[in-house]
Image (tube, helix red, strand yellow):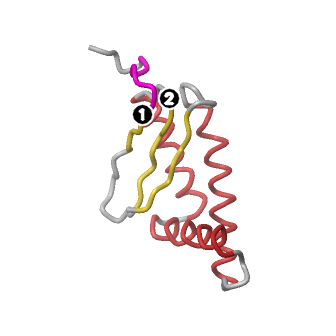
Amino acid sequence: MVALSQALPVLHIDIEMPKSTASRNYVIRVEGKNATVKDVMVAGFCYRVLLEEAIGSPAMVVRCFQAWTKEQSHGIDLMSKTEIAQARAWHKAHRYAHREASPLLSSPQALSFVFRLE
């Protein structure tokens, strides 16, 4: 039996943090080599909480992420002012959440937070 604090003996692991409410249409994953349960439950949770604190409701987090994705794919020429502001909000919140939650990862250089819509 592997202790919860030990790294799993897998070259690549993709662990999904469970959603805490039905209104959240996204998941935060911790991906990379030797991710631990602590990485998901502590650092992944912290990342999600910081995103939501910076942006607002889970629905607003989704809208901001979608705007950022649109900006990455098509540029800002076809975006409304609201979408541009939402894309900037996502970028700023992601950078903040990543900066604050990454030190909680067991191996910050080998692991990353991945935001996925469901």
**CB under 8 Å between discs 1 and 2:** yes
User: What SS does tag 2 mark?
Assistant: loop
Q: Disc 1 on helix, strand or loop?
A: strand
Compared with 68, 51 (above or below) is: above
Residue 105, disc:
none
> Which residue ends up furthest to the left in the rendered image?
1
Q: Which of the pair 55/28 is nearer the observer?
A: 28
Looking at the figure, which quarter contains the C terminus?
Answer: bottom left
- What main secondary structure does the magenta stretch of the protein show? loop
Mark 2 Cα within 10 Å, few/some/many (few <14, many 20+)? some
Please rate how many residues cluster around mark 1, counting C-alpha atoms within 10 Å: few if below 14, some from 14 to 19, many from 20: some
The residue type indicated by label 2 comes to Lys
Please give the name of the residue rendered at 43% of the width and 36% of the height, measured from the top-left corner: 40
Q: Specify whether residue 9 is painted magenta.
A: yes
- Residue identified by numbered label 2: 33
Residue 52 in the image: state x and y as whole percent.
52, 58
Spot occupied by residue 107 in the image (x, y as percentages of width and height): 57, 26
Q: Quadrant of residue 36?
A: top left
Q: Which residue is mark 1?
A: 13
Looking at marks 1 and 2 on the same chain, the residue that comes earlier in the sequence is marked by: 1
Q: Which residues are magenta?
A: 6-12
x, y percentage for residue 55?
58, 63
Q: Is residue 65 left or right of residue 10?
A: right
The three-letter code of the residue at mark 1 reads Ile
Q: Position of residue 117 (x, y in %)?
A: 43, 62
User: What whole-number distance in Å separates the C-alpha atoms at marks 1 and 2?
Assistant: 6 Å
Q: Is residue 7 above or below residue 26?
A: above
As displayed, is residue 58 above or below residue 5?
Answer: below
**Is residue 30 shown left or right of residue 64?**
left
